[in-house]
Image (cartoon, rainbow, N blue to C red):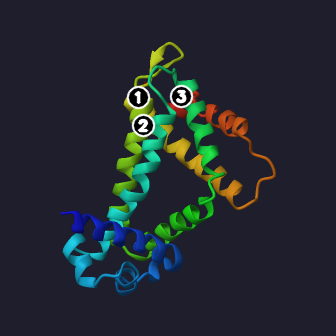
Amino acid sequence: MESKERNQRALLDAARRIVSRDGHRARLEEIAEEAGLTTGAIYSLFGSKNKLLIALVTDYLGPHYDGFEHAVPAGMDLTDAVDSFARYFRRLCDDPDAQRQLSFEISLLDLARHDPDLQPKLAASVQAHEERLAALFTGRPHQGTPLTPQQARRLATALRALLAGLSQRVILGLTEAAPEQYFADTARALTTRHVLGPP
């Protein structure tokens, strides 16, 4: 069992490096070689290239969303929760590994664009993780009423799009100054009824 987990970890780490470098041209043979294993190990442990890539997305997104949950503790109202989430997102831009992370995310989009079978599976995996984000906001008080699951989903989608775009600009050096306060201010602007929709 320990050997299986070690091999899975080696393949996921290798896949992340190769996908970041090669995008949709990533080859199983290179991933296996990078991990010091065979392509047979990929099929044995994951079943297919696409299943390895889905596992890779889950492996990548899981810790991010765990971090989100720690950054937005229970007990905050919606405005404070969104503020805290945005500030946490901005701090991720200062991670020394942020450029490599961005490269990996772009490579995943490249993979999905070139593989019609993989695209809906990747989308479903990302959607499942966004549901975790929506759950962080559901029920939090906002303007006298608790946020509904539907409103929380709308907010989660808008927040991820806004903050991912701002983060890309920061990481790529396209934005002169975008401190935590700016991220927080723009994120809080999404907590209007126009964005959230009806309860």
Secondary structure of the residue carrying numbered label 3: helix
Count of numbered circles on the image = 3
- In which quadrant of the rendered view does residue 135 lie? top left
Q: Position of residue 72 (x, y in %)?
A: 50, 31
Determine whether 34 is above or below 187 in the image: below
Return the mark for residue 138. 1
The answer to whether residue 120 is visible is: no
Counting residues from the start of the chain, the first of labels 2 and 3 encountered is 3
Query: Which residue has dot 2 on it?
Result: 134
Amino acid beneath label 2: Ala
Q: How many angstroms separate mark 1 from mark 2 (CA)?
A: 6 Å
Return the mark for residue 114. none
Return the mark for residue 81. 3
Secondary structure of the residue carrying numbered label 1: loop
In the image as oriented, which residue stretches furthest toward the front?
2
For the residue carrying disc 3, how many other residues have a C-alpha within 10 Å: few (<14), some (14-19), or many (20+)? many
Amino acid beneath label 3: Ala
For the residue carrying disc 2, how many other residues have a C-alpha within 10 Å: few (<14), some (14-19), or many (20+)? many
